Image (cartoon, rainbow, N blue to C red):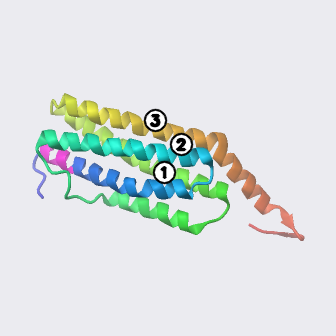
Amino acid sequence: MKLDGLQKLYVEELRDLYDAENQLLKALPKMAKGASFPELKQTFEDHLDETKEHVERLEEIFKGLDENPKGKTCKAMMGLVEEGSEILGEGGEKSILDARIIATAQKVKHYEIASYGTVCAWAKLQGEEEEADLLQQTLDEEAAANKHLSELAEEIVNSGALADSEEEEMEIGGLRRR
């Protein structure tokens, strides 16, 4: 499709986000299952409900635009979800796995923050204040989720991963293992 105007670009980016959010609907339960720290599991379960709301908001925007939300695959999210799946399949110390899961989840959040920030700005530029408000609401929720993940990592998960790493490096039988 030739993108010869901001409106077409806006709709294509919204489709990209719609697909990204739908990919997350499938990935979040796996992330929750793979997390060992209870608060991290709960964070992913809560964000699943929030992601459903994000999809509904996008559908509302598409309805107002009289456009179909389907038809685009978000390759960036596909790559991030694949990375997360690989991490979940690797195993290892639970605290280290939780730290890796958070790192991957934050990559997802940063992608979403950048994308929602862009389409929100484009909506405002085109005078679509109601759409901009819906997009801003999602952007704010994504930023809050990212902040919460940072707090979990800093307060609990990363210190456990460090302790497990140090334990792994302790001398065993005169040999050091990593």
* First along the sequence among labels 3 and 2: 3
- Residue type at mark 3 is Ala
Q: Residue at x 20, y 28 (%)?
A: 129
Q: Nearer the viewer, residue 129 or 67?
A: 67
Q: Mark 3 sits on what residue?
A: 144
Q: Residue at x 50, y 56 (%)?
A: 31
Around disc 3, counting alpha carbons within 10 Å, would you say few (fewer than 14), some (14 to 19), or many (20 or more)? few
Q: Nearer the viewer, residue 118 or 139?
A: 139
Q: Mark 1 sits on what residue?
A: 105
Which label sits on residue 4? none
> Where is residue 164 shown, x and y percent of the image?
73, 56
* Above/below status of 115 relative to 178: above
- Reply yes or no: does residue 86 show up in magenta: no
User: What separation in Å lies between label 1 and label 2 (alpha carbons)?
Assistant: 8 Å
Q: Mark 2 sits on what residue?
A: 149
> Where is residue 133 shown, x and y percent of the image?
27, 30
User: What separation in Å lies between label 3 and label 2 (alpha carbons)?
Assistant: 9 Å
- Residue type at mark 1 is Ala
Q: Is residue 68 left or right of residue 119?
A: left
- Marks 1/2 in contact by CB < 8 Å: the verdict is yes
Q: Nearer the viewer, residue 36 or 151?
A: 36
- Residue type at mark 2 is Leu
Q: Nearer the viewer, residue 3 or 16?
A: 16
Q: Is residue 177 left or right of residue 132?
A: right
* First along the sequence among labels 3 and 1: 1
Q: Residue at x 46, y 35 (%)?
A: 144
Which segment is the magenta one? 6-12
Q: Residue at x 34, y 37 (%)?
A: 138
Q: Quadrant of the N terminus?
A: bottom left
